[in-house]
Image (cartoon, rainbow, N blue to C red):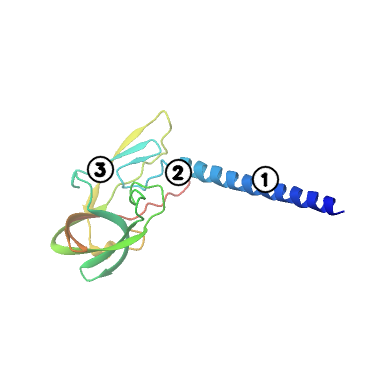
Amino acid sequence: MLQGLKERIIQNKKLILITGSLVLFVGAAAFVAGRMLNQKVVPVGSGGPIGSVQIVPAQELPKIPPEEEGLFVGRQDNIILVETDQPGGGGVFGSPVGIGGGPKVEVVVTIETILYLDTTQPPLRRPSGDDPRVLQQTVGEGTLDDLNSQSLVRVWGRKSGDRIIAEVLFYSNPVVFKRP
């Protein structure tokens, strides 16, 4: 009787070990598959590809990488708070990983700061694989009052302590695509 009990315990341990390993394997495979599927996802206005649409950055924007980029989270007078991406996330505009979640950065907007709003219009029809398109990004004059909790912000300027004095501030409000 004692021998039979030991055999059942050993069988149960094997079953638990095999089941646990299988769950871990399936979870890891789902994670990798999700990352691979989302590698091409970039928000509109980011200067990257969307499906087979290549967005060419607006001529008005600086050619160097921004000092900071992230999600607008608040404003007090001429200071805005931008929540950057988590370290190693690749930035908000270039990362398929979640938006924000990192440290908040203060951005000082002066009377000399140039504010641009992304005015790029999405293509009228969905591009096909045989019909790759290039979309020229367009910008218009922006104001701090247009920023909202969905705004994605890029800032060019100079760091002063833990703040950025903005020379150019570009923001994009997400485009909502409606199905016909």
Q: Residue at x 36, y 37 (%)?
A: 53
Q: Are marks 2 and 3 in contact (CB under 8 Å)?
A: no
**Amino acid at dot 3:** Pro
Q: Quick one: SS at disc 1?
A: helix
Q: Residues within 10 Å of mark 1 (few under 14, many from 20)?
A: few
Q: Are marks 1 and 3 in contact (CB under 8 Å)?
A: no
**Quarter of the figure with residue 109:** bottom left
Q: Residues within 10 Å of mark 3 (few under 14, many from 20)?
A: some
**Amino acid at dot 1:** Ile
**Place of residue 125 in the rendered image (x, y in percent of width and height, measured from the top left):** 41, 39
Q: Residue at x 67, y 45 (%)?
A: 18
Residue 29 in the image: above or below residue 172: above
**Amino acid at dot 2:** Asn
Q: Quick one: SS at disc 3?
A: loop
Q: Residue at x 32, y 46 (%)?
A: 121
Give the camera-side residue of 24 and 64. Answer: 24
Q: Earlier in the sequence, mark 1 or mark 3?
A: 1
The answer to whether any part of residue 153 appears in the image is no
Specify the farthest residue to the right: 1
The residue identified by callout 2 is 38
